[in-house]
């Protein structure tokens, strides 16, 4: 029973510590979502040049997309004309970091990880894009020849669409008139929410929904590691390539985003893992998962998938070694937050953290209630339509 209480205490401590920074990250991410249109991304990612690959990495790094959200975004970019190398660069940098994960990294892991993570994400994404450009060049040439013979048409391309009569569904009204449609359109324009409302709606809705499950799982696993995993269990692999390969193999199949992986990293650090090995997990975990690998193989081929996996693993291990060297040579251990520092706040700061945790928990609860209501409503509509 005492272990369960300790587990709950560790979970609450991590949740409270990350809450204000996660809220700040969600807010900034919502603002970016409204100000960075997809057409801007498509414009700068259409070629396989070094500049296009670099732009894809830099553009993707701060975007509020995790491992689940980046898949349809990258697929849309690819089918809209983005090159293989630029798409891979975008796929690596976008889920590895973001404005929300940087703020949570600062809160839970300290300033060193908040600086290193986005830099490592951008450089590893450029490296992955270049690997695809140089070693999948034969596939790219064949694809370009195919595209020159068959002009590309996009689902979003401008095409004349014949007028069609709209068939009402079983739940729709059977009568409609043109003037009613015009009036409805006019009212919709008037009732369209402001940018501020759209920012808050996206940040506290779709974006939070994308990360909430894995965030809670990450917090729970981090608390479990802190409570039950002995220090020598993870440290037995040392600080070398074996330890980093183990962390990469743990992270690759997981469906976890950069923000949700941060609490897990806290647990790994608390269990005695080296900063470099933890960085390997923070890079490889969000960048790869089964769904992403399946999409890459289907859309870009097995060779591109192999290069993608090799690039992510080799880059994460390389940056892991580099981080261990920097921490040792420049004595940067003080820039990494330890588990014991979680509660070191003044009374006023603790109040802010507590209120932020209450707000974040309320937003998560609201999402759960909406999901439940939507599920019940869909069930009722399905029953009504099929009866």
Image (tube, helix red, strand yellow):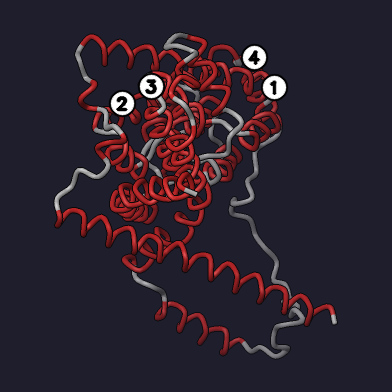
Q: What residue is shown with label 2? A: 116
Which class describes the residues within 10 Å of circle 4: few (<14), some (14-19), or many (20+)? few
Most foreground residue, 77 or 93: 93
Which class describes the residues within 10 Å of circle 3: few (<14), some (14-19), or many (20+)? some
Figure check: 327 above or below 379: above
Most foreground residue, 379 or 82: 379
Q: What residue is shown with label 4? A: 138
Q: Find residue 123 and name its label.
A: 3
The reply to whether dot 4 and dot 2 touch (C-beta < 8 Å) is no
SS label for mark 1 = helix
| Camera sees residue 158 | yes
User: Mark 3 to mark 1: distance in Å?
Assistant: 23 Å
Q: What residue is shown with label 1? A: 302
Q: What x and y, as percent, mark residue 307?
A: 59, 17
Figure check: 100 above or below 307: below
Q: What x and y, as percent, mark residue 283?
A: 45, 27
SS label for mark 3 = helix
Figure check: 165 above or below 113: below
User: Mark 3 to mark 2: distance in Å?
Assistant: 11 Å
Q: Residue at x 26, y 33 (%)?
A: 110
Task: Tell me: 176 left or right of 248.
Answer: right
């Amino acid at each position: 029973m005492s272990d369960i209480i300790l587990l709950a205490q560790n979970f609450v401590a991590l949740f409270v510590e990350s809450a204000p920074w996660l809220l700040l990250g969600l807010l900034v991410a919502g603002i970016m979502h409204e100000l960075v249109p997809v057409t801007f991304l498509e414009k700068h990612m259409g070629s396989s040049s070094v500049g296009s690959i670099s732009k894809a990495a830099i553009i993707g790094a701060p975007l509020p997309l995790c491992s689940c959200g980046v898949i349809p975004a990258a697929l849309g970019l690819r089918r809209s004309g983005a090159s293989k190398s630029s798409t891979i660069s975008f796929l690596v940098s976008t889920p590895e970091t973001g404005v929300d994960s940087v703020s949570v990294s600062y809160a839970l892991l300290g300033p060193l990880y908040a600086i290193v993570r986005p830099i490592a994400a951008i450089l590893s994404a450029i490296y992955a894009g270049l690997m695809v450009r140089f070693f999948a060049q034969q596939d790219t040439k064949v694809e370009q020849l195919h595209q020159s013979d068959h002009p590309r048409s996009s689902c979003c391309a401008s095409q004349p669409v014949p007028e069609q009569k709209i068939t009402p569904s079983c739940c729709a009204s059977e009568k409609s008139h043109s003037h009613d449609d015009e009036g409805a359109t006019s009212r919709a324009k008037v009732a369209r929410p402001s940018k501020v409302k759209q920012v808050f709606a996206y940040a506290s809705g779709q974006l939070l929904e994308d990360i909430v499950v894995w965030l809670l799982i990450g917090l729970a696993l981090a608390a479990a590691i802190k409570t039950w995993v002995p220090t020598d269990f993870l440290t037995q692999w040392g600080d070398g390539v074996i330890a980093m390969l183990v962390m990469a193999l743990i992270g690759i199949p997981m469906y976890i985003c950069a923000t949700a992986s941060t609490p897990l990293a806290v647990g790994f650090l608390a269990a005695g893992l080296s900063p470099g090995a933890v960085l390997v997990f923070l890079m490889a975990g969000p960048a790869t998962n089964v769904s992403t690998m399946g999409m890459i193989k289907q859309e870009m081929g097995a060779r591109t998938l192999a290069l993608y996996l090799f690039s992510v693993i080799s880059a994460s291990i390389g940056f892991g070694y580099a981080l261990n060297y920097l921490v040792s040579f420049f004595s940067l251990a003080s820039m990494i937050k330890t588990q014991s520092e979680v509660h070191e706040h003044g009374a006023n700061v603790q109040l802010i953290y507590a209120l932020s945790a209450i707000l974040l928990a309320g937003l998560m609860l609201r999402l759960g209630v909406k999901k439940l209501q939507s599920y019940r409503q869909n069930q009722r509509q399905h029953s009504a339509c099929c009866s």
